[in-house]
């Protein structure tokens, strides 16, 4: 049986096909078709089928990572939608939380709203924090309102009532009226999409869901039918932000959950590489053209966060739209190959703006005039001007001149020193991000391996590993199609969350049991819509804090029956997590849970055969020549070995400095580090081993 | 970058960049640890705290990017506490503490914790943080009342510098004194713990950073950072039109039946840098509203950071160029025991007044006046006997700007999140009836001001005290360059169906069923309303921010073009 995976990115659409018996994996990529993203997928698959490279009937699984939801939000091209809320609270969404994302900027704006104030309506009703009814829903008024909305041209309506996390009754009744009077309109209730307290964040999530749902629905329906036309009868699964797959059917009901689809799949690939090489603890480092993304895998499982922010300005926290969705934890900063370097106040600054793909770095020769990180890497000799992107592109001469003009002269440095400055300031920015992901979140980098991918990741990874004392660095095979490979190892997964504020004391276990019974029943109900059957493994967790604190930490809770003494286990889990994060415990302060979570994963019993990638054959010596490259510890520009990754044999052990070239990237190996190719085909770098 | 900033090169640019960024990141990291473990709403939602790193001589070298309110106090924090407890009396693991208004944050709720960083026996620097505690005792809940407080002695506990933490552990005797004097001891205790933790995190990283470069090299780098900061600030200010720019505005009063407080500023830009002088303002008052000089410095300095577009992080080098002064004994340089609990109410006016002055200097950088903000505290004992304080932050609008409208519901000057309705109702015996933009309250303009905001809160227990901290009940937020003023604010107590107007800084007893309605002013507009684009006018009417009538009256809109 075959599994096909396809990841539609901004520039390329990546494919991977795996034969589940032999483990053989074929990968390829085609340019993305931004106006109709499914076209690239369907056309490429049709070509494969007609050329005999793929037998449609053999395909058992179609796995997909998509940017459709993200792009709809970033480009503000989602549905026309309305919001219905509690009387008196029309402005909760437009006003937001009030904090400026930059204290020292009074000329900033809020994110452009997904729904205009003119499209926000109120109904008379009110619940108390415990879900009891203070004012009953005025049904007559609601019917009249919906009657007016019916002629408003809305494709979706979000319903967000105060305290609906505590009782969905009023929202459901409004939903029924909507479905009755506006049968063609999508209805999204906050009590379904995100039953958590804090009304602004819940409203933001529910509205974002309504905003993307009609598009996601139409897209997945069309894609499914296209696959059927190719006689690929496989069920279609979609990657969610949480790193799990769901059926297309389920994805349509919670469309906002697929917003970070592609990056999540990339982290899964890193987890798989870690597993192949025997590392449970992995820091993931993905550096592309515009940003760098850092994540972590603990005990083989990618770390997740209960909230996510989309459309942030310059990657600044608090500038985007908050979403209450579980997402694989990724810290994104404005440091990619295309990030622009400048001199200011006698210092070097980088980004957050990027030259992007057009015009791109100066060395692309497409009209770029401002030097970028990629230009610096070329001047430093790290990049091969004649073998960029597998030889598809020749890098031109302008880089050194641009660096000289804008950095070297103003700062009174040589061109190499200036390029080195750009490279190392970029590293310092990423080191700061990595410190947050690791040390600040209780992870000791000395116990972790780093998996680096993306076009620019392997150029910078070794320095980062050194700075944080990460002992091993892995550059995976097929790093250029990392997210597609990640899809092949993903599992079917659902997560649910709800708010119920509860003091953790000896009276708690009964209430805790009732909460999890409810969540687990709902997750089992949804699991019937997944594309695979198997044992459902349910993991519990909770957001907790000391009574009176405003921020919670997420804590995994024990499995099994919840009876007398469960509160003791909950407390113990909290203390451990709290100590890991903040370094101390306070046993006198009472503890409270605010939000409850279950994550259900389908264990379908399939044992996966290790993946064997088809890579270009190369013979002869792995060392193909040398060129000058900059290593300050070796005295500056020094002759450096060039290694053809595809010619590396398992017996080769090479000591840096060296440059390992492959189609999608170049790996910089520092003096004193050693490289070897592993049986699985990954490049393993031991930091400081020589 | 032009040649003026090329100062002497003692440190190569890459090292300088990396160390500078690291210092700022350490200060930010301390703030992260403090906020995430804090208990009081002021800290965790309001980010009313600050962090700083100092060199061994007590000079500020980096400050976290949090509220501007401590920009003024932070640079002097270390020098001030060391006057009481000199460095030779400090040991590893010690932390000093003060909440004095003059030495620290200008009112008692702000506790400063100062921790020396040791390498072996020697002090290599200091890490400091300050946080706004929910209550420090005194006459009324929250310790920030204006009315009925004539001397600082009624504002709660005053702690002159003491060694609060010894060998990493709290001095239990001092802690007992502090917690025995406050309304919510659990929260105060939790926040002091969070503050200790923030300094612990900062000290560890500070020590590692100094080790990585060596002490001599590190000290060289610090000199370079301070010199460059000073040079850059000078360069940016020198590029502005030079001269003295003046403006006057006012604060409503300092409690019911009191006169307005005059706020007058003279901003002088010359070869020495900039001097912001508030001496012509009123004298200090016998009510909990006065500003000690640290607070005046904070917002004066913040305003010049905005109007000068100062793009270097704050440190002692920047402070050499921006001077903020006020006559001793005046409202903006009050002398102990002047009460100052409610001084937070004044920050927006300090900024607005400097904004008015700078309109003549940098018209494209100023804006219409803010709507002010509401910072009421409601507190008492609920039906179950639990003591509670609801600390609230209500934001109105930004004034119109030179190329865009103001905004609704964004934090003015200081920078905070509001507290969610669902969180307030879960924690306190209150029901909130509405939070809404007030139509037509915005000052008209080519770029209109933001609308005022109305928030109605009902008391759901027998009795409580409300301590009001608002303004602009008596003078409208002004517009600039032909822009209109915003509508006046009101605070209304609805009792038994009757509306009772309250003063902006009143203290009132409430009873069950009372509804208190905060109605913030609108913000000032920027430029001639007749130049406003037809499309924007139409959008405002459709969104309900501006009525059809006002669109026609103030903007000259064609009624036929408007839908509503």
Image (spheres, grey):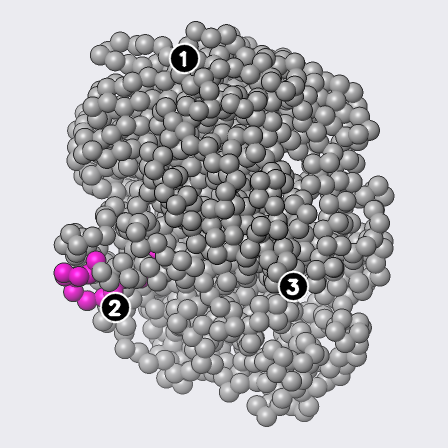
CA separation, marks 2 and 1?
60 Å
Which residue is under mark 1? B503
Please determine whether, in this image, residue B207 is positioned above or below residue B311.
Answer: below
Q: Mark 3 falls within which chain?
A: B
Using the image, name the chain to which the residue with label 2 belongs.
A
Q: Residue at x 33, y 81 (%)?
A: A607
Q: Which residues are magenta?
A: A554-567
Q: Which mark is residue A537?
A: 2
- Residue A621 in the image: state x and y as whole percent: 68, 90
Q: Are labels 2 and 1 on one chain?
A: no
At which x and y percent is residue A577?
36, 60
Residue at the (47%, 76%) spot, across then down: A273
The chain to which mark 1 is attached is B
Between A316 and B212, the one lying in front of the other is B212
The residue under label 3 is: B211
Q: Residue at x 61, y 71 (%)?
A: A466
Q: Is residue A580 left or right of residue A138?
A: right
């Amino acid at each position: 049986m075959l599994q096909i995976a396809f990841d539609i990115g901004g520039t390329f659409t990546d494919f991977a096909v795996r034969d589940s018996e032999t483990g053989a994996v074929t990968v390829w990529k085609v340019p993305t078709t931004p106006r109709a993203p499914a076209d690239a997928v369907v056309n490429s698959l049709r070509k494969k089928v007609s050329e005999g490279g793929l037998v449609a009937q053999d395909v058992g699984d179609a796995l997909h990572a998509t940017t459709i939801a993200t792009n709809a939000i970033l480009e503000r091209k989602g549905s026309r939608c309305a919001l219905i809320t509690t009387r008196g609270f029309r402005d909760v969404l437009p006003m937001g939380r009030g904090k400026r994302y930059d204290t020292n900027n009074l000329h900033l704006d809020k994110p452009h709203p997904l729904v205009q104030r003119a499209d926000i309506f109120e109904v008379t009703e009110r619940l108390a924090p415990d879900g009891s009814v203070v004012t009953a829903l005025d049904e007559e008024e609601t019917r009249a309102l919906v009657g007016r909305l019916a002629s408003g041209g809305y494709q979706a309506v979000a319903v967000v009532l105060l305290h609906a996390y505590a009782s969905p009754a009023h929202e459901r009744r409004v939903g029924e009226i909507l479905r009755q009077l506006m049968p063609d309109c999508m209805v999204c209730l906050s009590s379904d999409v995100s039953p958590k307290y804090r009304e602004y964040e819940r409203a933001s999530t529910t509205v974002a869901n309504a905003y993307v749902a009609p598009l996601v629905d139409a897209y997945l329906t069309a894609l499914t039918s296209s696959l059927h036309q190719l006689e690929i009868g496989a069920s279609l699964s979609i990657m969610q932000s949480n790193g799990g797959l769901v059926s297309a059917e389920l994805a349509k009901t919670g469309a906002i959950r697929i917003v970070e689809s592609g990056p999540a799949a990339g982290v899964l690939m890193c987890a798989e590489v870690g597993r192949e090489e025997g590392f449970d603890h992995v820091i993931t480092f993905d550096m592309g053209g515009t940003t760098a993304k850092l994540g972590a895998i603990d005990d083989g499982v990618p770390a997740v966060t209960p909230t996510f922010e989309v459309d942030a300005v310059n990657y600044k926290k608090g500038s985007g739209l908050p979403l209450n969705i579980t997402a694989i934890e990724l810290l994104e900063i404005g440091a990619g190959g295309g990030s622009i370097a400048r001199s200011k106040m006698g210092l070097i600054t980088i980004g957050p703006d990027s030259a992007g793909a057009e015009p791109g770095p100066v060395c692309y020769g497409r009209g770029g005039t401002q030097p970028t990180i990629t230009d610096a890497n070329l001047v430093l000799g790290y990049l091969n001007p004649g073998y960029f992107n597998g030889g598809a592109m020749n890098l031109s001469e302008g880089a050194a001149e641009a660096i000289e003009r804008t950095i070297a002269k103003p700062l009174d440095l040589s061109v190499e020193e200036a390029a080195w400055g750009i490279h190392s300031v970029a590293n310092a920015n990423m080191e700061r991000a990595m410190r947050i992901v690791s040390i600040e979140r209780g992870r000791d980098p000395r116990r972790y391996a780093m998996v680096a991918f993306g076009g620019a990741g392997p150029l910078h990874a070794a320095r980062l590993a050194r700075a944080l004392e990460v002992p091993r660095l892995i550059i995976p095979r097929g790093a250029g199609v990392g997210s597609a490979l990640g899809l092949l190892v993903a599992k079917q997964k659902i997560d649910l969350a709800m708010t119920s504020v509860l003091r953790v004391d000896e009276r708690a276990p009964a209430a805790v049991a009732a909460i999890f019974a409810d969540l687990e029943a709902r997750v089992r109900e949804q699991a019937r819509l997944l594309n695979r059957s198997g044992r459902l493994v349910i993991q519990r967790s909770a957001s907790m804090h000391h009574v009176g604190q405003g921020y919670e930490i997420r804590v995994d809770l024990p499995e099994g029956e919840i009876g007398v003494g469960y509160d003791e286990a909950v407390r113990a889990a909290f203390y451990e997590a709290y100590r890991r994060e903040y370094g101390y415990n306070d046993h006198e302060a009472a503890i409270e849970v605010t939000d409850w979570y279950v994550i259900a994963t389908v264990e379908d019993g399939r044992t996966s055969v290790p993946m064997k990638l088809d890579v270009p054959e190369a013979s002869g010596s792995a060392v193909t020549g040398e060129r000058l490259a900059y290593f300050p510890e070796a005295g500056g520009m020094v002759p450096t070995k060039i290694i053809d990754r595809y010619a590396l044999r398992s017996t080769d052990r090479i000591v840096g400095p060296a440059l390992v070239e492959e189609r999608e990237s170049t790996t910089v190996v520092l003096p004193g580090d050693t490289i070897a190719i592993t049986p699985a085909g990954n490049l393993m770098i031991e930091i400081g081993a020589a | 970058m032009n040649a003026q900033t090329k100062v002497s090169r003692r440190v190569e640019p890459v090292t300088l960049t990396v160390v500078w960024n690291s210092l700022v990141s350490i200060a930010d990291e301390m703030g992260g640890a403090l906020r995430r473990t804090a208990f009081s709403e002021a800290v965790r939602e309001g980010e009313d705290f600050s962090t700083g790193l100092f060199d061994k001589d007590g000079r500020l070298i980096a400050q976290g990017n949090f509220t501007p309110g401590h920009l003024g106090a932070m640079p002097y924090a270390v020098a001030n506490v060391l006057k009481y407890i000199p460095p030779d009396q400090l040991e590893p693991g010690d932390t000093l503490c003060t909440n004095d208004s003059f030495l620290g944050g200008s009112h008692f709720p702000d506790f400063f914790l100062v921790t020396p960083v040791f390498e072996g026996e020697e002090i290599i620097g200091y890490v400091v943080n300050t946080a706004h505690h929910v209550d420090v005792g005194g006459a009324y809940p929250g310790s920030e009342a204006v009315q009925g407080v004539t001397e600082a002695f009624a504002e709660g506990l005053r702690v002159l510098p003491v060694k609060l933490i010894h060998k990493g552990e709290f001095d239990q005797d001092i802690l007992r004194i502090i917690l025995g004097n406050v309304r919510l001891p659990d929260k105060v205790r939790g926040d002091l713990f969070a503050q200790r933790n923030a300094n612990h995190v900062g000290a560890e990283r500070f020590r590692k950073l100094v080790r990585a470069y060596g002490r001599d090299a590190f000290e060289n780098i610090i000199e370079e950072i301070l010199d460059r900061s000073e040079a850059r600030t000078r360069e940016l200010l020198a590029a502005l039109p030079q001269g003295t720019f003046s403006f006057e505005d006012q604060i409503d009063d300092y409690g019911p039946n009191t006169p307005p407080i005059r706020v007058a500023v003279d901003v002088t830009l010359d070869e020495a840098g900039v001097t912001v002088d508030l001496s012509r303002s009123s004298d200090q008052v016998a009510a909990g509203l006065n500003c000690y000089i640290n607070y005046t410095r904070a917002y004066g300095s913040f305003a010049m950071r905005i109007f000068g577009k100062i793009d270097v992080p704050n440190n002692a080098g920047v402070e050499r160029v921006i001077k903020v002064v006020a006559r001793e004994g005046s409202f903006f340089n009050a002398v102990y025991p002047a009460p100052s609990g409610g001084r937070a109410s004044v920050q927006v006016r300090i900024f607005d007044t400097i904004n008015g002055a700078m309109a003549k200097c940098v018209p494209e950088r100023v804006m219409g006046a803010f709507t002010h903000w509401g910072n009421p505290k409601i507190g008492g004992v609920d039906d179950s006997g639990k003591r509670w304080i609801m600390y609230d932050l209500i934001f109105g609008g930004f004034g119109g700007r030179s190329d865009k409208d103001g905004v609704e519901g964004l934090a003015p000057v200081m920078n905070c999140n509001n507290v969610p309705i669902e969180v307030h109702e879960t924690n306190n015996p209150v029901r909130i009836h509405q939070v809404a933009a007030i139509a037509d309250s915005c000052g008209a303009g080519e770029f209109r001001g933001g609308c005022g905001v109305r928030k109605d809160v009902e008391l759901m227990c027998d009795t409580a005290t409300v301590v009001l901290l608002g303004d602009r009940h008596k003078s409208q937020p002004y517009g600039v360059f032909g822009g209109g003023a915003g509508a006046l604010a009101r605070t209304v107590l609805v009792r038994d169906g009757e509306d009772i107007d309250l003063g902006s800084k009143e203290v009132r007893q409430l009873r069950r069923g009372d509804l208190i309605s905060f109605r913030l002013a609108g913000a000032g507009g920027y430029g001639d309303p007749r130049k406003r684009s037809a499309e924007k006018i139409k959008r405002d009417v459709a969104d309900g921010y501006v009525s059809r009538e006002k669109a026609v009256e103030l903007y000259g809109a064609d009624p036929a073009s408007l839908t509503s």
